[in-house]
């Protein structure tokens, strides 16, 4: 546990996170999680993390089919390969 001082940073206030803590988190983005009585800081997870594996799994399960067919005569006739 670390106790950090809140310091002025321009027109705002902030804390300086010690380098040893940032090293353990292995990130330069921090997520702040709010609950009823306190806040928790954790390494931010990239928004798209895991999407590639989810797409591969969806394809394996056949869950990546079009829900609607938007093709038209031009697409069917003019764009033949």
Image (cartoon, grey):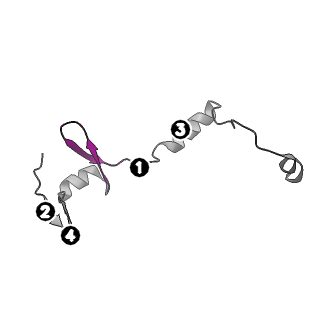
Q: Nearer the viewer, mark 4 or mark 3?
A: 4
Q: Which mark is residue 54?
A: 3
Residue at x 13%, y 58% (from the top left corner): 6
Residue at x 59%, y 34% (from the top left corner): 58
Residue that badge 2 annotates? 7
- Number of residues whose C-alpha sits closer than 10 Å to that of mark 3, classed few (under 14), some (14–19) or many (20 or more): few
Q: Position of residue 47 (x, y in %)?
A: 43, 48
Mark 2 falls on what kind of element?
Answer: strand
Structural distance between the alpha carbons of marks 1 and 2: 28 Å
Q: Nearer the viewer, mark 2 or mark 3?
A: 2
Marks 2 and 4: in contact by CB < 8 Å? no
Mark 4 falls on what kind of element?
Answer: loop
Residue that badge 4 annotates? 10
User: Residue 31 colored magenta?
Assistant: yes
- Number of residues whose C-alpha sits closer than 10 Å to that of mark 1, classed few (under 14), some (14–19) or many (20 or more): few
Left/right of residue 11 with respect to residue 62 in the rendered view: left
- Number of residues whose C-alpha sits closer than 10 Å to that of mark 4, classed few (under 14), some (14–19) or many (20 or more): few
Left/right of residue 79 with respect to residue 54 in the rendered view: right
Left/right of residue 48 with respect to residue 75 in the rendered view: left
Residue at x 52%, y 40% (from the top left corner): 53
Q: Position of residue 16 (x, y in %)?
A: 17, 60
Residue that badge 1 annotates? 46
Structural distance between the alpha carbons of marks 4 and 2: 10 Å
Mark 3 falls on what kind of element?
Answer: helix
The range drawn in magenta is: 29-46
């Amino acid at each position: 546990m670390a106790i950090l001082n809140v310091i002025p940073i321009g027109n705002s206030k902030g804390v300086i996170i010690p380098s040893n803590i940032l090293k353990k988190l292995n990130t330069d983005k921090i997520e702040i999680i709010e609950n009823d009585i306190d806040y928790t800081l954790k390494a931010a997870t990239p928004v798209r993390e895991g999407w590639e594996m989810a797409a591969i799994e969806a394809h394996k399960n056949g869950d990546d089919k079009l829900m609607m067919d938007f093709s038209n005569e031009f697409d069917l006739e003019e764009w033949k390969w």
